[in-house]
Structure formats: C-alpha cells, structure tokens
C-alpha cells in the first residue's frame, strides 16, 4: 500500500488490493497508527482528527480523480470491519473511501457497492486496478494544499494542543 498522508494518529493509504477499481472511482483507506477496535475507543481529539481527515482526503480524491479522467460524482465513506470479526486479532477501526464514478462499469453509480468476501471470492478482486502512482502523488499534494486552508486549521476545528 502506498502511503498518501500521515497525521498525528492516522495513516492514509492507497489500497493495494482495491475493493473499487480505479476507473470506477478508486479506493483509499485511513487507518489509525495504533490498533483501535471501534470508533467508541477514539479519544475526542482522535475523533475530530479522523472526521477532518476523511473530509480532506475525500475532497482531494474527488478533485484529483476528476482531473485524471475519472468522473467522480460522490465519495462513499465506510467503517466496516466485517471481514475480520472472526479472526484472532478481531476487527479494527479503519475507514474506506470509495470513489463513485458516474461512468463506472463494475460498481455502478447510484447503486450500493457489492463486495463479495475477499477470502471466499478472491478472483473477483484480481483484475481491479489500484490508484496509479500519479493519482497517489497528486492526491498527496492536494491534501497538503487543503491542510493550509483556514477552514481545516486546528483552530477552526477546535483542536488545541
């Protein structure tokens, strides 16, 4: 997985084995630096940081992918954890950002995502393309620009050190 951005408590990654093909909108994951089981375990500061980060990353993803020829109409934000509930390590908090392209061929725009269990149907995911190196680099740069805007400042979000 390519690292797109790192914040105090979270890492933003391009999914190596995406659940949504790049041309259907792409797939980005936000993970905590330290394993957290569920959102109820987040501190108030971490919860604010995560919400801000989802907004910034979603905005960057939408802008860059549209510029790169993928007609994103919406971003889906999901906190699932279903596939790991029966594993010894259990479920862990992580957010998926799924771009939803209007011209999607596999994950049709306006319909719910369909994701067969990866261990039961690995062949479904074999041909799905991850974000390109160019996409990742441009999303990284756009995140840095957005972080400099007043609307995303610590002060605007009520975060104090």
Image: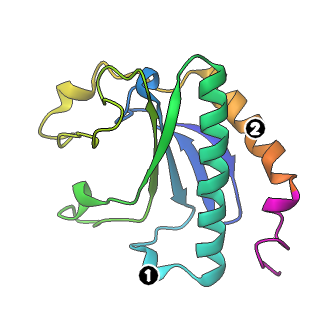
| Dot 1 and dot 2 residues touching (CB under 8 Å) | no
Between the C-alphas of marks 1 and 2, the distance is: 30 Å
User: What kind of colouring is applied to the model shown?
Assistant: rainbow
Could you tell me which residue is drawn at 62 percent across and 19 percent down? 68
Relative depth, front residue between 32 and 106: 106
Asked if the magenta segment contains residue 155, the reply would be: yes
Q: Earlier in the sequence, mark 1 or mark 2?
A: 1
Identify the residue at the far left of this view.
120
- Magenta span of residues: 150-161
* Left or right: 72 in relation to 9: left
Q: Please tell me whether mark 1 or mark 2 is closer to you in this view.
A: 2
Q: Is residue 149 left or right of residue 70?
A: right
Residue holding disc 1: 40
Compared with residue 113, is residue 105 higher up or lower down, i.e. above or below? Answer: above
Identify the disc placed on residue 142: 2
Image spot of residue 24 (x, y percent): 41, 25
Look at the picture and state if 32 lies above or below 143. Answer: below
Considering the whole magenta stretch, tell me its main secondary structure: loop
Q: Residues within 10 Å of mark 1 (few under 14, many from 20)?
A: few
Label 1: which secondary element: helix
Q: Quadrant of the C terminus?
A: bottom right
**Is residue 22 on the magenta stretch?**
no
| Image label count | 2
Q: Report x, y in % for residue 93.
A: 42, 65
Which of 35 and 145 lies nearest the eye of the viewer? 145
Image x and y of residue 79, in percent: 39, 60
């Amino acid at each position: 997985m390519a690292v797109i951005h790192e914040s105090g408590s979270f890492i933003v990654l391009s999914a190596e084995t995406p659940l949504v093909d790049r041309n259907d909108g792409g797939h980005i994951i936000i993970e905590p630096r330290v394993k957290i089981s569920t959102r109820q375990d987040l501190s108030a500061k971490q919860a604010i940081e995560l919400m801000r980060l989802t907004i910034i990353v979603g905005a960057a993803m939408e802008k860059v992918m549209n510029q790169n020829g993928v007609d994103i109409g919406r971003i889906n934000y999901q906190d699932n954890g279903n596939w790991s509930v029966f594993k010894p390590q259990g479920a862990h908090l992580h957010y998926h950002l799924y771009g939803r392209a209007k011209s999607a061929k596999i994950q049709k725009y306006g319909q719910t995502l369909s994701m067969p269990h990866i261990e039961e149907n690995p062949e479904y995911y074999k041909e799905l393309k991850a974000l390109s190196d160019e996409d990742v680099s441009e999303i990284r740069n756009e995140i840095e620009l957005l972080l400099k805007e007043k609307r995303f400042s610590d002060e605007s979000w009520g975060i104090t050190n």
